[in-house]
Image (cartoon, rainbow, N blue to C red):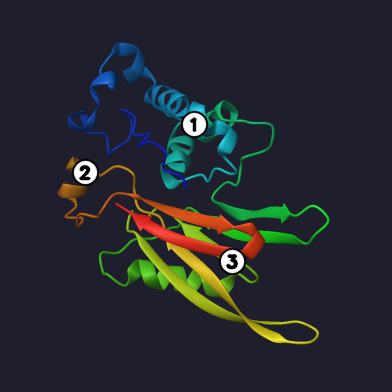
Amino acid sequence: MGDYCDFINLKDPRFDPRELAPWLLGADALSDIGRAESARFVNALAPVKSKCLALIEGNHEESILRHSDHDVYARIIDGLANGHDLRLNHSGFLSWRFSRQGGSVWTLRMYLTHGSGGGHSGGNVGNKLKSITASIDNMQIVAMGHHHDPDYKQFARLKVSRNKVRTVTVHAISCPALTGHMTYAQSKDYPPRPMGYAMVTVTPDKRRLGVTMHS
């Protein structure tokens, strides 16, 4: 969902040597923090790269490209390539088709976005989820990152077919961060947020989705 690493190099006004991991303190890593971090991230995900369906570009990847010549998002895409294009940029649609032999076909449709904006109020993330979900039609899952604030909501939509009207549930997810911010977040008086991950369980033969938030 983006922001795979900080990608804050020495030229960035947000750079703070107190936040550097020990493995970044060598001269080679410091000379190209973007390359060092993206290489470490690709190496960490290499064992599961065959399971990657899509990769979103976050504002940290966008910022280092805008202020320097480091396209770390392209490096990550290339490093985790598994035979199909993983690039969705800031946001995009992902369709996953399930078929039973001699039976029906079910398509799971997802809208994935890194997200944008900020705010300290408790309703900020929920309102953003509601707004994004209302603007996208015919999705079963809407997921965003960026806010580092876990949230999960269900929204109902009426779907009209030739002979009937049925209610469709849209699962809207704000994905939490896997790691926490420290010095920078404290200096800006950002509230602490729980770390964790969102897990979607797909049962194709029953056309059923389940979402759980883990911390």
Q: Of the residues shown, which amino acid type is indicated by label 3? A: Gln
Where residue 108 sits in the image (x, y, percent)? 64, 59
As drawn, the label of residue 33 is none
Residue occupying image coordinates x 19% and y 52%: 188
Disc tally is: 3
Where residue 124 sits in the image (x, y, percent)? 34, 69
Mark 2 and mark 1 lie on one chain; the one further toward the N terminus is 1
Q: Seen from this angle, which residue lies furthest right?
A: 102
Residue occupying image coordinates x 25% and y 64%: 120
As drawn, the label of residue 140 is 3
Q: Of the residues shown, which amino acid type is indicated by label 2? A: Tyr
Say which element carries label 2: helix
The answer to whether 190 appears left or right of 47 in the picture is: left
Disc 2: which residue: 184
Where residue 17 sits in the image (x, y, percent)? 20, 28
In three-dimensional space, the C-alpha distance between marks 1 and 3, rounded to whole angstroms, equals 30 Å
Say which element carries label 3: loop
Residue occupying image coordinates x 56% and y 39%: 52
Q: Nearer the viewer, residue 212 or 18?
A: 212
The answer to whether 94 appears left or right of 196 in the picture is: right
Residue occupying image coordinates x 34% and y 34%: 8
Disc 1: which residue: 72
Q: Of the residues shown, which amino acid type is indicated by label 1? A: Val
Vertical placement of 114 versus 138: above or below? above
